[in-house]
Image: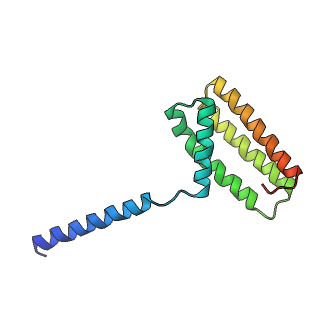
Amino acid sequence: MKPKNTILLLLCVLVLQLFAQFAVAQTPPSPEKQEAIAKLEKLSSELQLTPQQKKQMMPIMMEEAKKMKAVKADASLGPLQKAMQLKQVGTDMDTKVQPILNPQQYQKFQQIRTQEREEMIQKMRSGQSM
């Protein structure tokens, strides 16, 4: 192959690669990711998280959102089973979050989680879908 053709081919490959990266960057986040981001922003504001803490918590929040969605979508589970599994997902998250937060932040975090759980129980009692 001639050097001129090789350079042209390389340039084309680079341009295609840039377009591919741009297209991936423009893909809207999944509903789970949107939910996790919104929840993290709310927590960040209430707990006054540092940038490092936010960075550490994001994968935990994503994992929790995916697990919560899976439990809620599982039609084979009854309401009590769903509630128990959702509580377990939350407990697992709490365990992962505790080392990231300082004691005051964790105490506030626990208050927020307690309130969220009470709201979920109210929804279940009123027959709303989770």
| 21 shown above or below 115 | below
Q: Position of residue 65 (x, y in %)?
A: 65, 51
Type of colouring: rainbow
Viewer-proximal residue among 110 and 31: 31
Give the answer, above or below, for where 24 lies relative to 84.
Answer: below
Q: Quadrant of the C terminus?
A: bottom right
Picture residue at 72% right of the left edge, 32% below the top: 110
Q: Quadrant of residue 56?
A: top right
Position in image of residue 30 (x %, y %): 57, 58
Apparent side of residue 42 relative to residue 110 in the rendered image (left or right):
left
Residue name at image x 50 percent, y 34 percent: 51
When asked about the image quadrant of residue 21, the answer is bottom left
Q: In the rendered picture of this protein, how many numbered marks are placed on residues?
A: 0
Q: Residue furthest top?
A: 104
Residue furthest out toward the bottom: 1
116 vs 48, left or right, is: right
Give how far across and how far down residue 50 sits, in percent: 52, 30
User: What percent of the width, then of the height, locates residue 10?
Assistant: 21, 67
Q: Nearer the viewer, residue 126 or 74?
A: 126
Residue at point 80%, 46% (across, down):
120
In the depicted structure, whether residue 96 falls above or below residue 127: above
- In the image, what residue occupies the spot 76% across and 41% down? 116
Q: Quadrant of residue 16?
A: bottom left
Which quadrant of the figure contains the N terminus? bottom left
Q: Residue furthest right?
A: 125
